[in-house]
Every structure is written in C-alpha cells, then in structure tokens.
Image: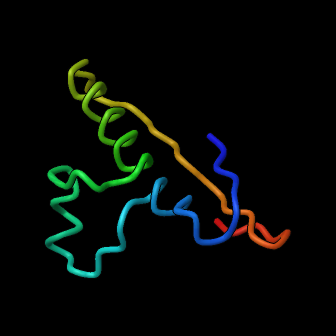
Amino acid sequence: MLCYGQTSTGKTFTMEGPEHTDRDRVLAWDEDSSVGVIPRALQHIFTELEAQNAEEFSVRVSYVELYNEELYD
C-alpha cells in the first residue's frame, strides 16, 4: 500500500491511527473505531491464522516511511 500526499493531510493517521500513550488504551485498540489500516490488517491476519488452528505459523511484517528523501522504518 502506498500513501502519497502533502504534509499534514492524514496519511500517517490513516495508516496507524491515533497515537496512544496509555498502555491500557493501546491494548484495547481492537475496540477502537479510529484505528488505522495497519492494526486492522494485523488483526485480520491473526484472526484468520487463529481460525486455522495451526500449531505453528510465522508472520513477518515491515513498513517504511519516506520523508524528504529519507527512509524511516
């Protein structure tokens, strides 16, 4: 997925959702309707894996931010 646009248009918010500093709030993200695309995708992946009743599985995820021609991971 690629988000592209001007600074301060909501790209990071769309992908990640709101910043939570309260640990309990972070753990309850699945009940929060404002979560971003990334947490929703992760929830879906793990829900599907859990439904398969596999004893073992491996998930690898990464994403980067390109800002002013610099990459951040």
Which of the 4 image quadrants contains residue 44?
A: top left
What percent of the width, then of the height, locates residue 70? 81, 71
Closest to the observer, 9 or 72: 9
Q: Residue at x 20, y 76 (%)?
A: 23
Closest to the observer, 6 or 44: 6
What percent of the width, then of the height, locates residue 11? 56, 58
Looking at the image, residue 35 sits to the left or right of residue 71; the answer is: left
Structure colour scheme: rainbow
Closest to the observer, 63 or 8: 8
Which of the 4 image quadrants contains residue 8?
A: bottom right
Looking at the image, residue 48 sits to the left or right of residue 61; the answer is: left
Closest to the observer, 48 or 59: 48
Q: Is residue 58 above or below residue 15?
A: above
Q: Residue at x 69, y 57 (%)?
A: 5
Q: Residue at x 46, y 54 (%)?
A: 14
Looking at the image, residue 15 sits to the left or right of residue 49; the answer is: right
Q: Residue at x 19, y 63 (%)?
A: 27
Which of the 4 image quadrants contains residue 66?
A: bottom right
What percent of the width, then of the height, locates residue 55? 26, 27
Question: Farthest residue in the top direction?
Answer: 52
The quadrant the N terminus occupies is top right
Number of marks in picture: 0
